[in-house]
Amino acid sequence: MDVQLAVSLGRLQLPNPILVASGTFGYAREMAGLVDISRLGGILPKTITAQPRAGNAPWRTVETTGGMLNSIGLDNDGIERFIEHHLPYLAGLGVPVIVSIAGGNYDEFVAMATRLQGQRGVAAVELNISCPNVSHGVDFGADPAMCARVVRGVRAACDLPVLAKLTPNVTDIVAIAQAAAEGGADAVSLINTCLGMAVDWRKRRPILGNVFGGLSGPAIKPIALAAVHRVARKVQIPIMGIGGIASIDDVMEFLVAGATAVQIGTANFYRPTATMQILDALPSAIASLGAGSVAEVVATLSVFAREQPLGAPK
Ligand SMILES: Cc1cc2nc3c(=O)[nH]c(=O)nc-3n(C[C@H](O)[C@H](O)[C@H](O)COP(=O)(O)O)c2cc1C
């Protein structure tokens, strides 16, 4: 079966559209014995920050119906240790590495992107402007003007392709995606986790140490699909679909709804081989639609053909 799997998101070229989401694949070493990493379309290591962070108090994760909540709080070693210790390993995998960065302010975002410029193995940066688990984590993802400014600043500071990862915890994600596009983003990544919480009523306590956390897994797939589709109908730049993806059917739904590539997150925890199974099934799924490439099926949902866009649901 001769199906073209390579896709481009702006200036970012990927061998195939199946990537792994930040925070769910460690720094890849942890997963090396479980999956053939070289087959992946790309890897997003855990978000890094300018300085090391210890993260939030336990508990940091809890299983929920159809998903999980996490409030890790961007526990990471900081950008310098990442460059020194994790990046050489990641760069040797022969897979595009998209480095997820979270600045505490505008200057930190720009400085981190500048530091990553020219580092061997870095294919792109993903701006995590959507973390619900740190204070000010979503500031840049909740305000269109701030989003456009930080994307523009990073874009001006480095030559790397720039992805903006957006939060669903806003009134109008389309407006934020539009701002990211205006700022010069190569693509938007949709979505980060949905704000949630879990309660132990007997103890009358929240289960997570941070009270609130981010909901992920199959439970959020319909939210993510709606976000991808709404943005695809209004915004011109490519979309990286994320949220509850665990099977080839999930992947195909996101592609048809408007995503050019996808990231697998929570599924890596409960079925680490999910990405491999998806990659095995992808060519025949594309061919079953009569297409010869992934790009041919992107944004082909029948409603795209209508004259009048549906717009947001009433
Ligand atoms: C334990 C955990 C840690 C995460 N850490 C990050 C992170 O550091 N940076 C980030 O951008 N997203 C992080 N995410 C969000 C995922 O990348 C993804 O956007 C989200 O989980 C939705 O996809 P999924 O339903 O496939 O998991 C994390 C998710 C989980 C479950």
Image (cartoon, rainbow, N blue to C red):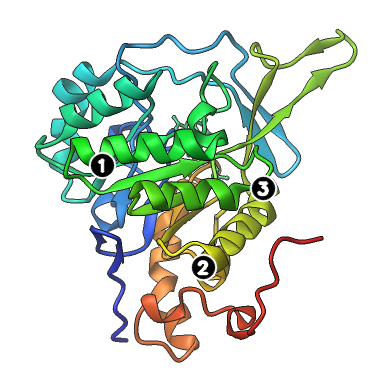
SS class of the residue under badge 2?
Answer: loop
Q: CA distance from mark 3 to mark 1?
A: 30 Å
State whether residue 190 appears in this view. Answer: no
Q: Is residue 144 placed above or below 185 in the rendered structure?
A: above
State whether residue 120 appears in this view. Answer: yes
| Residue under the point 54% across and 28% down | 138
> Which residue in the protein does label 3 denote?
220
Q: Where does residue 298 sit, x and y in percent of width and height?
A: 46, 74
Q: Where does residue 157 sit, x and y in percent of width and height?
A: 20, 35
Mark with earlier residue (3, 2): 3
Instruction: Report the disc number at residue 155.
Output: 1
Circle 3: is it few (<14), some (14-19), or many (20+) Cα within 10 Å?
A: many
Which residue type does callout 2 highlight?
A: Gly
Instruction: Report the disc number at residue 258.
Output: 2
Q: CA distance from mark 3 to mark 2?
A: 17 Å
Circle 2: is it few (<14), some (14-19), or many (20+) Cα within 10 Å?
A: many
